[in-house]
Every structure is written in C-alpha cells, then in structure tokens.
Amino acid sequence: MMDKFKEMSKSDNVHFQTRDKFEHLHKILGEHKFWNNQAIQKSFEYQKEGQIKVYKPEDISDEPTPLPPGFEWYTFDADDDAEVDRICEFLMDHYVEDTEGNFRLYYTKEKFRWGVCNPGRIKDLNFLVINSKNKKIMASLVACPKKIVING
C-alpha cells in the first residue's frame, strides 16, 4: 500500500500555482466592508507559486500509524455491496446533519461509489477505523491522488 503512495509521490507531485489575474479589479472595486474582514485570500494578495508540500519516498513510513488500543485500520473494498451498504449507513448516521436534525445527507451505493471509485484511485487508500471487538465503523477515510492547478 505505502509503495503505491511512494510511487505516486515520486512521479505525480501535486502542483498548486496561483497568479493574480485580477489586480485591476481591486483598483476598480476598492475596499469591501465584508470580504476584506474574512479569512480568505484577497484578490490583491500575492501568493507564492509552486508546490505546497513534497514528500520524499524515504520519509513515508511503510507501517501504518498506530491507533489507540481497541481500534484498528481496515482497508475496505468499494466494489463489495455489503461493505458499501455498511459504510453508507455509517455516513448517514454520523455525517452532515443540521443542528435541528431536519437535514441529513442520504448516501446510496451509487453516490458513494461515484465519489470513491473515480479515475486514478488507489484502492489501498480507502480506510476505515473500526472497533477491534465488535468491528463497528468508527471513522472513514478516503483518498484519491489529484493534480491541481489553481489560476494556471
């Protein structure tokens, strides 16, 4: 599993590039009472271009991060209907709900697979944290490598 991630990090470093193409708009629009007080990048702020973080293959451990006693890592199979049903139920019970309990996302197998089984996926990067005793899902982690260019 980690060998695949190491290979990916060698050949597919993610590049984030930003260029301020809208500096002229700041001159036209001037100050904005709301947006200029928010924790977002301002259109007139310059950002350093290039990679955000580069991982050297030798810096990536071959061993998974140890979990506290009573928990274990579990690599799930997104092609297994029973596992996907179990994960969808977990997500519906524990993910995205409004404070009054009136709104909750409903995850179908198709919707879940659409998000997880995209091009470039590495099956070994789909994890669950489960209870060691009863195998109940405690957390879900899904990763898919992406190359992203922003304002490029």
Image (cartoon, rainbow, N blue to C red):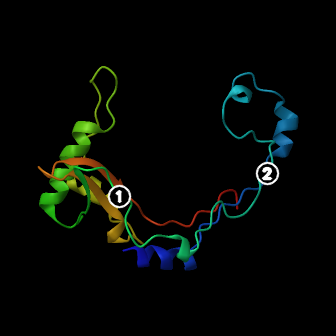
Q: Tell me the quarter of the image containing the N terminus.
A: bottom left
Residue nearer the viewer, 64 or 51: 64
Which quarter of the picture shows residue 115? bottom left
Q: Nearer the viewer, mark 1 or mark 2?
A: 1
Tell me what residue is drawn at x 33 percent, y 70 percent: 124
Residue 49: % across, % down: 75, 60
Residue 126: % across, % down: 32, 62
Which quarter of the picture shows residue 147? bottom right
Which residue is the site of mark 1? 66
Asked if residue 30 lies left or right of residue 51, the reply is: right
Q: Is residue 18 above or below residue 60?
A: above
Asked if residue 89 lies left or right of residue 121, the reply is: left
User: Element at badge 2?
Assistant: loop
Q: Tell me the quarter of the image containing the C terminus.
A: bottom right
Residue 72: % across, % down: 25, 56
Which residue is the site of mark 2? 20
Q: Is residue 33 above or below residue 87?
A: above
Label 1 crowding class (10 Å Cα cut-off): few <14, some 14-19, many 20+? few
User: Element at badge 1?
Assistant: loop
Whether pointer 1 and pointer 2 mark residues with C-beta atoms closer than 8 Å, the reply is no
Residue nearer the viewer, 32 or 130: 130
Asked if residue 29 lies left or right of residue 34, the reply is: right
Asked if residue 25 lies left or right of residue 55, the reply is: right
Name the amino acid, label 1: Pro
User: Mark 1 to mark 2: distance in Å?
Assistant: 42 Å
Residue 85: % across, % down: 16, 53
Q: Which numbered tag is attached to residue 40? A: none
**Upstream in sequence: badge 1 or badge 2:** 2
Q: Is residue 12 above or below residue 144?
A: below
Name the amino acid, label 2: Asp
